[in-house]
Image (cartoon, rainbow, N blue to C red):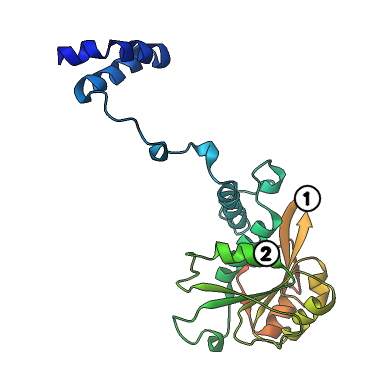
Amino acid sequence: MALRWRGNARRRRVAAATLGADSAKVAVNRLAISGPGPRPSPRAIRPSASRIVPSTRRWALALPLALVLFGLGSPSPLAQDREPDAPTDAQIKAAYIHRFLGFVEWPASQLPSAATPLLVGVAGADAVQLELERFVQGRPVQGRPVEVQRIAPDTPPRRQLHVVFVGDERGAARRVLDGYRDLPVLTVADGPWGAEAGAVLSFVPQDGRVRFQASLPAAERAGLRLSARLLGVAVRVTGAP
């Protein structure tokens, strides 16, 4: 033991200069017990928190934003106002769409069994579709898996869908929304124009935040029941008594 202690005198001096006296004693004692040992592999060094992938940090911010809208947190400015790792609009809207699924009641015919997945169709919003596909992985809603599908322009309506998100008010994408107005499908539009177009929910900007408005007549026409908790945080509810 003494031989090892003397043989590592140089290491003691380096440790003392780098770590300080208290930390140096710990480091030297370890050396005395275990010997010099092999040099650690660069791959074995764990990256610091500052090197976490930026997209992971953005998703970590987007999740609380969706929860805030449903009374699970206190309102605060949207994270897109924070730089440089704020979530994108597409990530925020994807988180909201996923959250909407837990606050809507569909007719029994739309969910014939406990294993029936929740199907989300996306038209005219490639960025939101991509982020939603990432977001739903490993995040079931009420025990049901969530699947995302792209809706191509001029595609006949798919009655088996549970949610249709339309990201463009122009041309073919808007016609997609028209095709689902009378089906038991939660239609969500990306903009205030959705209210007059017959969407059940529409994203709207408010004070630098992404919020949403709801239409009870549109929900009733589709045969859907919207949770009071969902309606309670909408910035506007059309058809409310």
Q: Quadrant of the N terminus?
A: top left
Is residue 49 found left or right of 61 in the rendered image?
A: left
Crowd class of label 1 (few under 14; some 14 to 19; many from 20; radius 10 Å): few
- What is the secondary structure assignment of the residue under circle 2? helix
Q: Earlier in the sequence, mark 2 or mark 1?
A: 2
Do we see residue 38 in this rendering? yes
Residue at 58% across / 70% down in the picture? 101
Q: In the rendered structure, which amino acid carries the disc numbered 1?
A: Asp
Crowd class of label 2 (few under 14; some 14 to 19; many from 20; radius 10 Å): many
Number of marks in picture: 2
**Where is residue 158 shown, x and y percent of the image?**
65, 86
Are circles 2 and 1 on residues that touch, CB within 8 Å? no
Quadrant of res 106 = bottom right
Q: CA distance from mark 2 to mark 1?
A: 22 Å
Q: Is residue 109 above or below residue 165?
A: below
Q: Quadrant of the C terminus?
A: bottom right
Which label belongs to residue 12? Answer: none
Which label belongs to residue 128? Answer: 2
Which label belongs to residue 207? Answer: 1
**Where is residue 56 shown, x and y percent of the image?**
55, 50
Q: In the rendered structure, which amino acid carries the disc numbered 2?
A: Val
Is residue 112 found left or right of 148 in the rendered image?
A: left
Quadrant of res 12 = top left
Residue at 55% across / 69% down in the picture? 102
Residue at 63% across / 57% down in the picture? 69
